[in-house]
Image (tube, rainbow, N blue to C red):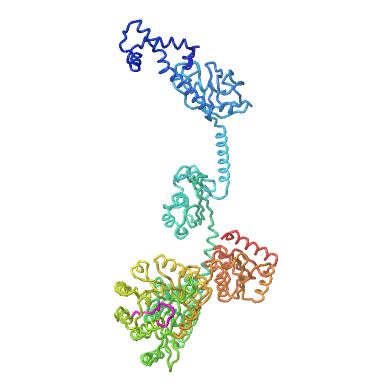
Amino acid sequence: MKQTTRPSQLFSHPLTIFGTLLLVTFTTETAVMSVLTFMFPTLAGFSATLTDAFFLTMLSAPMVWLLIARPLRRMALAESAKADTLLRSIADAVISFDANGSIKSLNPAAEKIFGYPPHEIEGRNIEELLPELPHLWSRSGAPSPDASLSSPSPEEETIGRHRDGSTLSMEVSLGLLDAEDCSTFIAVIHDITHRKRAAALVEEQREFLESLLQQSAVPIFVVSPEHRVLIWNRACEQLTGKSAQEMLGTQDAWKAFYPERRPVLADIVLSGDLQAAREGYGSCIPSGFIPEGLQSEGWYRDLNGRDRYIVFDAAPIRNSRGDLLAVIESLEEITQRKLYEEQLEYQASYDTLTGLINRNLLADRMRQALLISRRSRHEVAVFLLDLDDFQMINDTVGQDGGDSLLKMVAERLSGCVRGGDTVARQGADEFVVIVSDPALSDSAPVIAANIQETIARPMRVKGQEVIVTASIGISISPKDGEDVQTLFRNAEVALYRAKEQGRHSFQFYTAEMNARSLARMTLEKHLRRALERDELSVHYQPKVSMSSGMVTGLEALVRWQSPELGSIPPDSFIPLAEETGLILSIGAWVLKTACAQNKAWQEAGLPLLTVAVNLSPRQFRQQNIASLVADCLNQTGLDPRFLELEITESMVMQEVTRVASVLAELKQMGVSLAMDDFGTGYSSLGYLKRFPFDKLKIDKSFIKDITFEPNNAAIAKAVIAMAHSLHLKVIAEGVETQGQLNYLHAQGCDEIQGYFFSRPVPAVEVEQLLREGGRISIPSHAEGCPGKTVLVVDDDEDVLSALQRMLLLEGYFVLVAQSAQEGFEQLALNKVAVIISDFRMPIMDGTDFLGRAKELYPETVRILLSGYADLDAVTHAVNVGAIYKFLCKPWIEADLREQLADAFGHYAQLYGKK
């Protein structure tokens, strides 16, 4: 075999060095002379004879050694050291062997991978380490080491054998150590044993999980980030009729469920497209949703045309880095259960004969209509209809004929009202129509006459022509009542009187209307003389800061004390004054009186406060209000900073452009502006931004029920947040309880006004209040520890006492209430962890109470305790999360203790760190 001399051996002996340099000198004389001439200029004149050449050679040989050879040797040694360090540091095995396969050397990584020390393996055949080496030669393009390799072979996967006999997985690349010398070969080996084992384990787990999914009775499918179906189990095949062979690899998972394109949940989770989610699933997609999991349910029609109700659950599958790998979706068919639930719900709310809503749903619709009417200032009318002599007609045409007649009456009633109105069947031959409109006092007679005319048209029943007439009793909110019970009771009274007048007539609830007409005439006569007789006075209601508890301002309110009529409530004479135009003179007088009084307080050394005065719609329409205010300030000397003008929301929206101009003029004077009764009108954020208001006042109608009416609480919370985002302060009117104060303080309300602190009082009492430094105690957010606090609500005093005794012995802090109203007040005043409520209570039952408590105080754990209950109502409450547990009376104390401990444990688990 040809031997190769290493560069380091070239300069190993001085004689060799000298001979080599001599040879170099004679063959490269010109180069050497150039170097010497550069270094020793005096040599430039020597003759280039042989003797001179020899002399020069003898001189130049040491110089060549110094200038060329020694640096070359150093470089070779350095490169050798670098190569040796590299071989020792790399993680891959490197083995050199000769053409016979005899191992010549190996690096430390090879020693570690194969388990052999160098002295034990060197000289042995490399096939002991790489049994499949012959196959590698053939795959690399050379049949054996005898054939030359033009370049290193690509990595090939093979097996290796450890010293202990175990098999290793390898990736091997073969090559020559020197392309000009074919005597030494190297193998670079990468150990992939652990990687192969991990891959095998992953594959085994994947096959196991896929087997589980295939065996599952729940329909499950998995899609890739590219929306391709990866798994489609047998249950999916059975549900949809689509085989796995058809579905795998396709992007059409939705086609198995929807006849038209509608995004499946997996698509939504993959894309994060909330707009598509809401278009596909509507209200089931919460606002602000981040698709890390999603649930929906709904009807779909399968490929056989059968309607099915399916619950869909989808969730992303991610790796440890959070990368999305796939989405898994499961399905559950609950068609029969859903049909049964819908049937029960329909039967509970709708009349099975006519399809109209029944009395159960009617009360809810009525409550909604009243709530909307309070905000929009509309009236709500109840038309209570009774078919005249229906029993006689029913006897004539038979029960089937009577049922047919009732259906036709229902159809005619539904056809003669607007889409937003309500038609219901109250009883056998009683129907109810609910209408909302701004001026029902004028339009109600027309509506009633139209209803009677529509019903009275001839009908054919069993071949007979039948004419049915109806008597109608009418009550209108708010003048005839502001709650469902009062309005229906008054409508019944009116219906009774209509029937007394004969068939086919209608009657308003007239007892109050007749009295009101007479009272109005008397009131107007006295009001016209009240101002000149000095019967009017201004009272002031303090406004209190929610941060300091101190009085920050006052609202001026007119009061009327008549010598003949006594004390007249503002709600009685203010609308009359507005209607008759008397409000112009009354309003101007109140403004001047309030400004003068505030100036007098300031001169007396009392704290500087702002006084607020209400402006009426008529003042805005008929008076130059800016001039009126300017004159008043000039006459009284009050600084404009201490005057605040309150304008109602509805007034602002009537003439937007003109009102904006007037408000801007007032603002230029330095007067502050507040929007009064906010929430009762129809202003939008867009309009609100156009007006230079400083404050918003939440109407007292929302504050009244804020501690037990979730809708009102939500509105108040939203108004506060919205106002603060527009840099406006918020004042809550009508605060009467500590609970209301606590709730508003928690929501960040700036100021409150109401009977909780002070009723409107005369100026002399205001002065006394200010001198005494009257204030309220502001609740602290840190007050109270709910960890052991339980609220028990039951109208039975004996049950309440028994529960209280038992719970006190267990170490709980017990709050009690005998009604839902008292319960809400306790919740507003205290931080409560667990609520125990009886089911049957007057006015509001336990499920309704706990449902509202969930909306207002979602962190509470709620338990229903009762001896009897409406199963549907309880089931619904449990399903929507209003009830954590339902326990029966009489209770077993040990069981109750256990369940209560579990409830507190649940609370601690969820909120213990908050």
Q: Which residues are magenta?
A: 603-618
Question: Is residue 607 in the magenta section?
Answer: yes
487 in relation to 68, above or below = below
Front in this rendered view, residue 231 or 498:
231
Q: Which quadrant: the C terminus?
A: bottom right
443 vs 347, left or right, is left
Classify 735 as above or below 73: below
Q: Position of residue 851 (x, y in %)?
A: 54, 68
Q: 650 or 66: nearer the eye?
A: 66
**Residue 749 sits above or below residue 157 on the image:** below
Residue 76 at least partly seen: yes
Horizontal and vertical percent for residue 721? 44, 66
Q: Is residue 386 among what the camera can see?
A: no
- Between residues 664 and 525, which one lies in front from this camera angle? 664
* 265 lies left or right of 803: left
Name the side, left or right, on which 113 lies relative to 543: right
Q: Residue 332 at what x, y percent from top left?
A: 54, 54
